[in-house]
Image (tube, helix red, strand yellow):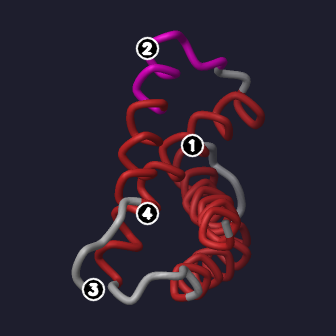
Amino acid sequence: MTSLLTFCAAALMEIAGCFAFWAWLRLDKSPLWLIPGMLALALFAYLLTLADSPLAGRAYAAYGGIYIASALLWGWAMEGNRPDPWDVIGAAICLVGMSVILFGPRSLPA
């Protein structure tokens, strides 16, 4: 459960950091947006190191499902783009995959 919370926090930081760059380049916002963007991206990277996984690749793969669902929620909350049924189905598939990676039984130590 700790990994899920860590992944959710990491997703928020990654999306916020990337959105700051998007705002600067695509929405003509001030370059000052880059400062919190870079801080958010650094915090994102740090948070991923806290995931309860002995392997970085497995942690990143599991994180991907959370990121996808979070990105759709960000688009809805921050940009007013409500996910359509295909978005919801795609995110659900990714979350199932994330669950298999994160919670699947392991017969051999990682």
Question: Label 1: which residue?
Answer: 71
User: In the drawing, does residue 106 fall left or right of residue 73?
Assistant: left
Amino acid identity at mark 2: Trp
Quarter of the C terminus within the rendering: bottom left
Which one is earlier in the sequence, the residue at label 2 or at label 3? 2
- Please, is residue 89 above or below residue 34 in the view? above
Between marks 4 and 1 in the image, the one whose residue lies nearer the viewer: 4
Q: Amino acid at mark 4?
A: Leu
Give the mark toward the camera: 1 or 3: 3
Q: Which residue is mark 2?
A: 86
Report the mark closest to the observer, 1 or 2. Answer: 2
In the displayed structure, does residue 70 sit left or right of residue 95? Answer: right
Query: In what element is the residue under mark 4?
Result: helix
Residue underneath mark 3: 110
Q: Position of residue 84 (x, y in %)?
A: 54, 12
Dot 1: within a 10 Å radius of its alpha carbon, few (fewer than 14), some, or many (20 or more) residues?
some
- Residue 100 falls left or right of residue 47: left
Q: Hey, what amino acid is under mark 1?
A: Ala
Q: Nearer the viewer, mark 2 or mark 4?
A: 4
Q: Position of residue 85 (x, y in %)?
A: 51, 10
Mark 2 → mark 3, Cα distance in angstroms: 34 Å
